[in-house]
Amino acid sequence: MNETEVIEIARQALLISIQIGAPILLIGLVVGVSIALVQALTQIQEITLVFVPKILAILLAMFVFLPSMMQTLVIFMQELADRMIGLG
């Protein structure tokens, strides 16, 4: 295994981590910004109003996206295992 293969594997790992984390982070961002906008418009400054809906939205997103996340990780791990077998 040479340097280019190691760099390619690291690049793939970073892209997969972004691909897996992005949907949940974006949902948390959208929910947080929308609640902050509602708080700014209504001048309600309740701390729990931000955290509870954001946590619920992130948990719901995890339940929705978890199967596709696991499928992506399984495919990546199978490719890594195939490369390791090819080394021997």
Image (spheres, rainbow, N blue to C red):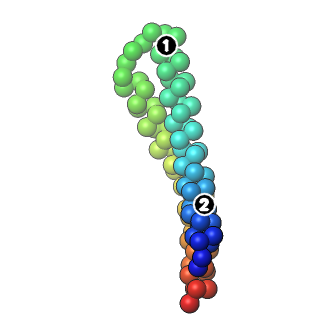
Q: Position of residue 11 (x, y in %)?
A: 60, 60
Which three-letter amino acid code belongs to the residue tagged 2? Arg
Q: Can residue 36 be seen in this view?
A: yes
- Front position among marks 2 and 1: 2
Near mark 1 (Cα within 10 A), the count class, few <14, some 14-19 or many ≥20, is few
Whether residue 16 can be seen here: no
Residue identifier under label 1? 40
Tell me the number on the disc at residue 11: 2
Label 1 near label 2: C-beta < 8 Å? Answer: no
Closest to the observer, 50 or 64: 50
Q: Label 2 neighbourhood size at 10 Å, few (<14), some (14-19), many (20+)?
A: few
For image coordinates 58% across by 45% down, the residue present is 23
* Relative to 5, 29 lies left or right: left
Q: Where is residue 67 in the image (x, y as percent from the top left)?
A: 57, 58
For the point 37% across and 18% down, the residue is: 46
Disc 2 secondary structure class:
helix
Q: In this rendered view, identify the residue nearer to me: 9 or 60.
A: 9
Q: Quadrant of residue 75?
A: bottom right
- The quadrant in which the C terminus is found is bottom right
Q: How far apart are marks 2 and 1 (CA)?
A: 41 Å
Residue type highlighted by circle 1:
Ala
The one of 54 and 85 positioned closer to us in this rendering: 85
Q: Is residue 2 left or right of residue 40?
A: right
Element under label 1?
A: helix
Instruction: Single out the residue that lies furthest toward the front.
Output: 3
Q: Is residue 39 above or below residue 78?
A: above
Disc 2 or 1, which lies upstream in sequence? 2
How far across and how far down the image is residue 80, in percent? 58, 74
* Above-or-below relation of 74 to 65: below
Residue 84 is situated, as x and y percent measured from the top left of the image, at 56, 81
Q: In this view, does 58 lie to the left or right of 51?
A: right
Q: Which mark is residue 84?
A: none
